[in-house]
Amino acid sequence: MESLVVISKVKKFIKDQGDCNTSANFFEPLNDDIVKSCREAALHAQKIGRKTVMGKDFNLYVEGAAIEEVLVVTSKVKKLIKDEFGLSTSSAAIEQLTNRVQTICKKAIENAKNDKRKTVMDRDFSAPTTL
């Protein structure tokens, strides 16, 4: 599966937020989580009869998600949703995914620091159940 996250921007986000480096292994579970979230949101949109995946289709919706920089590859997210479900994707969906990536990264930074490490690794990943 192609990466739906902008790896260089996520690395920068982690560096800026926690002064941590990032292991290459961190990106596989992060990407898998974003793919799963896209699929779940698309299924939700289909279930209620919409032709567009919106921000509110994501299970951890945050009203007015404050993002400074998009951390997902918008064209790849839209392609995944279009190819697999035949649906369009709103810009709010991209904001929700970026918010999810930010939340995951902040928790991973915390996990790494609790283990007294300066490198975020795959074992620091945890899928958020609440934001």
Image: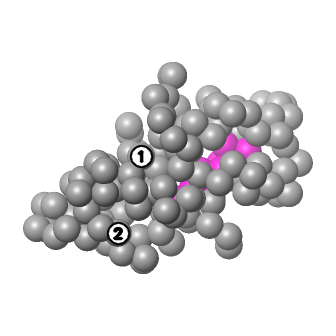
Q: Is residue 2 left or right of residue 24?
A: right
Q: Which residue is mark 1?
A: 102
Quadrant of the image occupied by residue 44:
top right
Element on which disc 1 rests: helix
Q: Residue furthest top?
A: 64
User: Which of pointers 2 and 1 indicates the residue nearer the eye?
Assistant: 2
Can you tell which mark lies on residue 22? 2
Residue 96 at what x, y percent from top left?
55, 37
The amino acid type, in three-letter code, at marker 2 is: Thr
Element on which disc 2 rests: strand
Can you tell which mark lies on residue 83? none
| Front in this rendered view, residue 59 or 96 | 96
The amino acid type, in three-letter code, at marker 1 is: Gln
Q: Earlier in the sequence, mark 2 or mark 1?
A: 2
Give, as a single range, the part of the protein colored magenta: 33-42
Residue at image location 38% in from the left, 45% down from the top:
103
Residue 45 in magenta stretch: no
